[in-house]
Amino acid sequence: MENNQHAYRNLDLCTKDCLCLFVCPVGAADTENGQIDFEKCIGCGACSKACPSHAITMIPNKMPPQQKKAKEVINTLFKVANIKIDEIKTLEYLTENSTDDVEKHFFKTLIHSNKVMVEDIMREAGYMLPQSRNTNKLLNNLLEKDENNKEIITQLLKKLEVNE
Ligand code: SF4
Ligand code: SF4
């Protein structure tokens, strides 16, 4: 079987019932850090089918090309993202100044959901896709500025080939 995908385990969803360990033909699901061993994984998908918690996703080794977006669409997405970012700032201010625990909790939930929306919008606008040129530029900028994470950024740049 051609290895054109590999398994990824979401540790937040994993309930550790170990079915994946039993079905994996190469022992790639049994690791010290809880992640799938990409070097061993042959991409058969057995673990993903067996997992009752939907904690394992099969990820293609090569990402599809990013969709092209019209300038008008990108600009509109940026506008919506900026509205959401303003909302987040207002909610952060309200959270800091609230004395009511329930209200604080409610504001924090709204902040979280707004952040998730901004991430989705930016992805749609062509940012944050691992294979996009924008991500490549972002990582190269970080490489210059972030002294502490140079090694991991260099590794990411090697793995994330631009395919636009
Ligand atoms: S089968 Fe799913 S829930 Fe069970 S250990 Fe594996 S990943 Fe975790
Ligand atoms: S995809 Fe197959 S080889 Fe890879 S971890 Fe899952 S069961 Fe093991």
Image: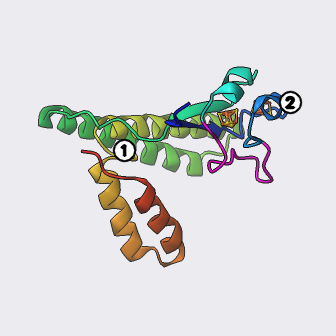
Q: Does ligand 1 reach within 8 Å of label 1's beta carbon? A: no
Q: Earlier in the sequence, mark 2 or mark 1?
A: 2
Which residue position is annotated with label 1?
86
Q: Does ligand 1 reach within 8 Å of label 2's beta carbon? A: yes
Does 131 sit above or below residue 137?
above
User: What's the amino acid at mark 1?
Assistant: Asp
Mark 1 surroundings within 10 Å by alpha-carbon count, few (fewer than 14), some (14 through 19), many (20 or more) = few
Q: Quadrant of residue 66?
A: top left
How many numbered discs sit on the rendered protein? Answer: 2
Mark 2 vs mark 1: in front: 2
Viewed as shown, does residue 42 lie left or right of 28? left
| Magenta stretch bounds | 30-42
Q: Main secondary structure of the magenta part?
A: loop
Which residue position is annotated with label 2?
17
Which residue is painted at 31% across and 47% down in the image?
132
Ligand 2's image quarter is top right
Q: Residue furthest right?
A: 17
Q: What SS does tag 2 mark?
A: loop
- Residue contact at pointers 2 and 1, CB within 8 angstroms: no
Does 137 sit above or below residue 132?
below
x then y, percent, for residue 156: 46, 59
User: What's the amino acid at mark 2?
Assistant: Asp
Quadrant housing the C terminus? top left
Q: Which of the pair 146/24 is nearer the observer?
A: 24
Which residue is painted at 36% across and 39% down in the image?
123
